[in-house]
Image (tube, rainbow, N blue to C red):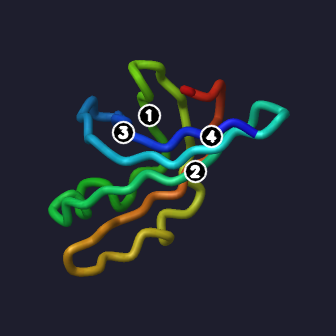
């Protein structure tokens, strides 16, 4: 199993980019998943309903889906954690 823990960039459909901390894993079949963590509570209204996008790890893109938008509960001061499932090749 391969893993990546470190900085990444979230790209959403409208072209905006957000810095994030990524914790990603890839299994022996190449499937990958993980979490993106955001510490800026002002991002919650922008990102709460994101259902898919791209994450860049060292400028390598990985496409993902977010099957459950209710997994991210707003709590004062964050952090906010988004669970993602890779839908293509892993970016790490």
- State yes or no: discs 4 and 1 in contact (Cβ < 8 Å): no
Residue 55: image tag: 1
Q: Measure how far apart labels 1 and 2 are at the Cα level.
A: 11 Å
Spatial distance from mark 4 to mark 1, Cα to Cα?
Answer: 15 Å
Dot in front, 3 or 2: 3
- Percent position of residue 8, x then y: 38, 36
Mark 4 or 1 closer to N-term? 4
Sequence-first disc among 3 and 2: 3
Q: CA distance from mark 3 to mark 2?
A: 13 Å
User: Which of the numbered marks, if any, corresponds to residue 69?
Assistant: none
Decide: marks 4, 2 in contact (CB < 8 A)?
A: no
The earlier-in-sequence mark between 3 and 1 is 3
Instruction: Please say if the residues under marks 3 and 2 sit with CB atoms less than 8 Å apart.
Output: no
* Residue 3 - label: 4
Q: Do the CB atoms of the residues marked 3 and 1 lie less than 8 Å apart? A: no
Q: Earlier in the sequence, mark 4 or mark 2?
A: 4
What SS does tag 2 mark? strand
Q: Relative to residue 63, is residue 44 drawn left or right?
A: left
Left or right of residue 32, residue 72 in this image: left
């Amino acid at each position: 199993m391969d893993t990546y823990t470190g900085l990444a960039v979230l790209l959403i459909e409208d072209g905006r980019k957000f810095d994030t901390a990524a914790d990603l894993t890839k299994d022996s079949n190449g499937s990958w998943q993980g979490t993106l963590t955001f510490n800026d509570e002002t991002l919650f209204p922008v990102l709460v309903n994101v259902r898919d996008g791209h994450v860049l790890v060292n400028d390598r893109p990985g496409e993902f889906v977010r099957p459950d938008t209710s997994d991210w509960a707003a709590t004062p001061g964050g952090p906010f954690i988004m669970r993602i499932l890779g839908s293509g090749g892993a970016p790490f």
